[in-house]
Amino acid sequence: MNNQLIDGLVQTILSLSLEERQLLLKRIQDAQTRDEIHQKLHHYEQQYSMTSEQFYQQFLTGELGDAADYVDWAGFYEMLQPQPVAS
């Protein structure tokens, strides 16, 4: 373990304003959420022997039906897609 790095991070975090600490916490939580979604996608990919991209294309065309797993899988996949930038 790199104690010097940890000590430096602690000092940096303590020097942040409350607003900055809240933003940091939100970003950490967002990263954890993305990791959990990736794990769910990986589970479905293993279970159904196809990539999420392959699944999603077939799901959109109606080839797979609307089983609960498929609806969940599609939702998780969509959560990780880049959001269009508003003009």
Image: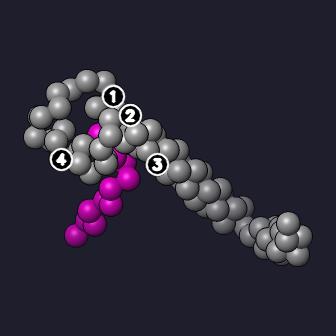
User: Which mark is drawn over residue 69?
Assistant: 1
Q: What colouring style does the render use?
A: one colour
Q: Amino acid at mark 2?
A: Gln
Residue shown at the point (49%, 44%) measured from the top left: 39
Residue shown at the point (25%, 24%) measured from the top left: 67
Of mark 4 and mark 3, the one earlier in the sequence is: 3
Q: Residues within 10 Å of mark 2 (few under 14, many from 20)?
A: few
Q: Are marks 4 and 2 in contact (CB under 8 Å)?
A: no
As drawn, is 28 to the left or to the right of 67?
A: right
Q: Are marks 3 and 1 in contact (CB under 8 Å)?
A: no
Quadrant of the rendering where the N terminus is positioned:
bottom right
User: Which mark is drawn over residue 57?
Assistant: 4
Towards the viewer: 29 or 64: 64
Towards the viewer: 80 or 84: 80
Of mark 4 and mark 1, the one earlier in the sequence is: 4
As drawn, is 77 to the left or to the right of 64?
A: right
Q: Amino acid at mark 3?
A: His
| Residue 8 x %, y % | 83, 75
Boundaries of the magenta span: 73-87
Q: Amino acid at mark 1?
A: Asp
Of mark 1 and mark 2, the one earlier in the sequence is: 2
